[in-house]
Image: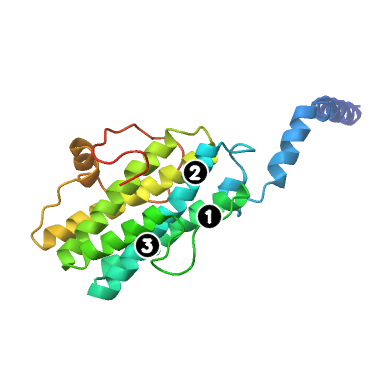
Amino acid sequence: MEEVENMRKKILSLGLLGFMFGIIFGSVAAMPWWADAWDRESSITWDRPYVAIYGNDTLTQEEIDGLLWMREEEKLARDVYLTLYETYGLQIFQNIANSEQMHMDAVLSLLKKYGIEDPAVDEVGVFTTPELQALYDQLIAMGSQSVEDGLKVGALIEETDIKDLEEWIAKTDNADIIQVYESLINGSENHLRAFTRTLSVYGVTYEPQVLDEDYYNEIISSPMNTGMGGVGGFRGRGMGGFRGGRW
C-alpha cells in the first residue's frame, strides 16, 4: 500500500508540473509582443555593422551635408598623412593614415545605408569639394617645410576633426550618426595625443589652434582611448578659432 501511495503522489506531482508549464507557455504564446520581439532579435545578423540596426529611416539635408563633409575631411587627413609619410618616412604618419582609412570606411557605411552617393575619389590628394582641395594643397605646403611642421599639421588636422565632429553631432538626433561621430572623436583624440607627444620628442610644445585650451589640455593629459567607442559620454566643449565645419 505504501508503494502505491508513493506512486500516486508522483503522478499527481507530474500532473501539477505539467499543468503549470501549460499555463506558462500558453501565456507566453498568447503575447504577440513577445513573439514579435523574438523575431526581430533573432533576425539581426550581429556581424554586420551596427549602423544597419540603429538610426532613423531618413536623414535631414543637414545630416546628409555632415556625412558628405566628414567623408572627405577624413580622406583629407589620410591623404595628408600618406603624403607626409612619403616625404619624411616617419612611421607615425603611416600608422595614423591607416586609422584614418578606418574613419573613412565608418562614414562610408552610413552613406551606403542611407543611399547617399560617395563624394570621395580614389586618387590621393584629389577632392570633390573645392574648399577641401584648397585645404589639402595648403596643408601639404605647410607640412613640407620640416618634419616638425608636418607633425604640427597633423595636430591641427586632428583638432579640427574633433571640432567639426562635435558640431555635426549637435545638429542631429540620429543614433547611427552620433555613434559613428563619437567613435571618430575618440580616434582623433588619440591621434592628437600621438602628434603632440612626438613633437615633444623634437623639443616642440604644441599650442592648440582650434580647440579651447582647457579642452585641449584635458585631451592630451588623458590616457589613450581604447576601442571604437559607443554612444554616450559626449560632452559639449568650448572651441575657439574656426567654425561651421570649416578651418
Residue at 24% over, 54% down:
155
141 or 23, nearer to the observer: 141
89 or 32, nearer to the observer: 89
Residue 73 % position (x, y): 40, 53
- The image shows residue 211, relative to residue 71, as above or below, that is above
Residue at 59% over, 40% down:
54
110 or 21, nearer to the observer: 110
Give the structural element (helix, strand or loop) at label 1: helix
For discs 2 and 1, the disc positioned in front in the rendered view: 2
Residue at 36% over, 51% down:
187
* Colour scheme employed for the rendering of this structure: rainbow
Q: Are marks 3 and 2 in contact (CB under 8 Å)?
A: no
Spatial separation of the CA atoms under disc 1 and disc 3: 14 Å
Residue 181 % position (x, y): 44, 44
Residue 23 % position (x, y): 83, 24
Going from N to C along the chain, the mark reached first, 3 or 2, is: 2
Identity, as a three-letter code, of the amino acid under mark 2: Asp
> Which residue is the site of mark 2?
65
> Which residue is the site of mark 3?
78
Quarter location, residue 229: top left
Assign the N terminus to one quadrant of the image.
Answer: top right
Identity, as a three-letter code, of the amino acid under mark 3: Arg
Tell me, yes or no, if residue 89 can be seen here.
no
Give the structural element (helix, strand or loop) at label 2: helix
Residue at 68% over, 41% down:
41
197 or 160, nearer to the observer: 160
Going from N to C along the chain, the mark reached first, 1 or 3, is: 3
- Left or right: 37, with 46 as reference point: right
Spatial separation of the CA atoms under disc 3 and disc 2: 20 Å
> Which residue is the site of mark 1?
108
- Left or right: 160, with 18 as reference point: left
Spatial separation of the CA atoms under disc 2 and disc 1: 13 Å
